[in-house]
Amino acid sequence: MNKKQKIAILSLILISSLSYAQSELNIGSGAFITTTGASTLTLDNAKLVNNGTLTDANGTLQFKGNQATANTTVSGTGTNTLNNLTVNKSSNALQLDSNIAVSGTLNLQSGGVELNNSNVNLGTTGQLQNENETNYVSGATGNIVATSTLNAPTNSNPGNLGASITSSSNLGITTITRAHNIETVQDQSIKRNYTITPTNNTGLNATLTFNYLETELNANTESGLFIWESTNGGTTWTQFTSTLDAANNTITLTGVNSFGKYTADTANTLSVTSLDANQTFSLYKTNNQLNVKSSLEIKQINVYTITGKQVYNFNTINKNTFTINLNQHANQVYIIKTQFNNGQQITKKILFLIRS
């Protein structure tokens, strides 16, 4: 019997605790470790490589030590079904190279979690605990997900992920997916976004309180943050009037009738750049449509209301002319921000009316 097999058998009858302080605990293909009772499996400066099955129904998997994040990992092709996962490192974080499910607590006692293209599924009962400016979940790829039944919720925060929802409506089974990639919005968003997916997603009149950490600001000026929403998975974004509480790191958006994807960025800045004397640009209306024409090749057009709300975002146009159908948003003043492929841009204001 080899060392790996002995460890697996020991873990099957584990009733109190097991500490493993070598470089790697390996669960081979077809093998499994099952903890029993309120047991604790501690990996001290060690990696977990699971190509089999790790089941921790009632206990805790704990990572300790001071090894670099890349040397404290959960990896392998196996299944990681955990009750509690505790990160208790004196320095650095835990890196996930495999997906995990946590039904109890993901406790960031000391050190954070780097998702690294992996997912944490908290299900309907898991909770993220003790996240702060030094111990937090991060990663340009990967998600942490929680699910909850929200019927007329009041400040309900599924999984303690930081998206709190209030509504007099029944949203039903609702999934909150939190990610930390940077979105291209007005400029570059903060390093956090939420995708909220309720079963009932109409007529909600809900309030969303968006929590964030200052370490996620990504060079954005905190005092200028607004909530931005995308209804197409992040392709285009619309800025909404929202209320910032910088002292508590929250932004609140009211009157949400249907949920989508949300991040935070600063407000629109509509700078005007004059074209050279030999370059032309015009806006004109024909057949209840707005036409944009330029001697320069157009890269992108953003359309805003006079209050700064973005209503259209057209990317990769790569033409000298473009037509915008504004019928559904007619009879108001628009700000048209046009960017060209040579790096120049120009902003114009136009009153668009449809005559009956």
Image (tube, rainbow, N blue to C red):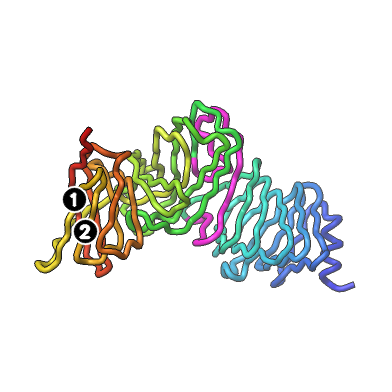
Residue drawn at point x = 35 percent, y = 59 percent? 315
Left or right of residue 296: residue 248: right
Q: Residues within 10 Å of mark 1 (few under 14, many from 20)?
A: few
Q: Residues within 10 Å of mark 2 (few under 14, many from 20)?
A: some
Q: Please report contact status of discs 1 and 2: CB closer than 8 Å, yes or no.
A: yes
Q: For the residue labelled by badge 1, is the local secondary structure a helix, a strand or a loop?
A: strand
SS type, badge 2:
strand
Reading the image, the residue beneath label 1 is 284
| Residue 238 pos. (x, y %) | 36, 46
Image check: 42 left or right of 11?
left
Q: Camera-side residue: 9 or 234?
A: 234
**Percent coordinates x, y for residue 124 in the rendering:** 65, 41
Residue occupied by mark 2: 293
| Of residues 225 and 337, the one drawn nearer to the viewer in this rendering | 337
Q: Based on the picture, tell me whether residue 162 belongs to the magenta stretch.
A: yes
Residue in the picture at 35% in, 44% down: 246
Magenta-drawn segment: 134-163
